[in-house]
Amino acid sequence: MSAVEYLLDFLEKELCRLKRKGMQKNEPVALLTCSGTVEQGIESATDLGFPTANIRFEAPDISGTYAGKVLVGKDEYYAAVYANRKRRLLEAHLLDFSGDLYGKPITVILLERLAEAKVFLDPEDQRNFVERAVAEVERYFNRIQ
């Protein structure tokens, strides 16, 4: 099953689930859904202890840090996602995941924008920002469950 077929199947099942359940106020609505093959990045986040799965995206109005989900095969992970408009990359740090995703198809779903794009003063500033973003993503998912 291709990534596109998987995404369509997932969305169809999700729509059926929502119709049966009725949309609730705390149900997150996707701001962007993007599928692609994970590619090598510059590994600056990995060097800070936050490896990312990077895929290309084309939405010109999307930038900053988001709470999101990443679909890897049939598995779903919460993620802190940085939409790097300059490099046209979604850089997703999957929570509670370890493994190698290079060359594999994934789908990234952005759910809530947490912060504007930021220029970091140094690696420590970047590490502190990413730590806060990951903590905010955890709070976000605890709040909507």
Image (cartoon, helix red, strand yellow):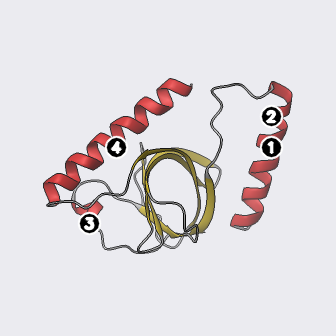
The picture places residue 31, in percent across and down from the top left corner, at: 61, 50
- Within the image, what quadrant is residue 104 found in? bottom right
- The label shown at residue 21 is none
Residue occupying image coordinates x 22% and y 55%: 126
Query: Could you tell me the amino acid type at mark 3?
Result: Ser
Query: Which residue is painted at 38% across and 52% down in the image?
Result: 116
Mark 3 → mark 1, Cα distance in angstroms = 36 Å
Residue receiving disc 1: 13
Disc with the residue nearer the chain's start (3 vs 2): 2
Residue with the mark numbered 2: 17
Front of the two marks 3 and 4: 4
Asked which secondary structure carries label 3, the reply is helix
Task: Point out the frontmost of discs 4 and 1.
Answer: 4
Residue 44 is labelled as 3
Q: Where is residue 100 in the image (x, y as percent from the top left)?
A: 43, 63
Q: Which of marks 4 and 1 is nearer the N terminus?
A: 1
Q: How far apart are marks 2 and 1 (CA)?
A: 6 Å
For marks 2 and 4 on the same chain, the one whose residue lies earlier in the sequence: 2
Find out whether the residues at labels 2 and 1 contact each other: C-beta distance under 8 Å. Answer: yes
Residue under pointer 4: 133
Q: Mark 3 and mark 4: span between their CA atoms?
A: 16 Å
Q: Which residue is drawn at 63% across and 56% down?
A: 33
Badge 2 marks a residue whose secondary structure is helix
- Mark 3 and mark 4 in contact? Answer it, CB < 8 Å: no
- Visible residue check, residue 100: no
Left or right: 44 in relation to 81 = left
Q: In this view, does 135 lie above or below 121?
A: above
What residue type is disc 4 on?
Answer: Ala
Residue 126 in the figure: left or right of residue 80: left
Please state which amino acid type lies under the numbered disc 1: Lys
User: Which amino acid lies under the numbered mark 2 shown in the image of this protein?
Assistant: Arg
Measuring from the top left, give residue 11's x and y in whole percent: 76, 49
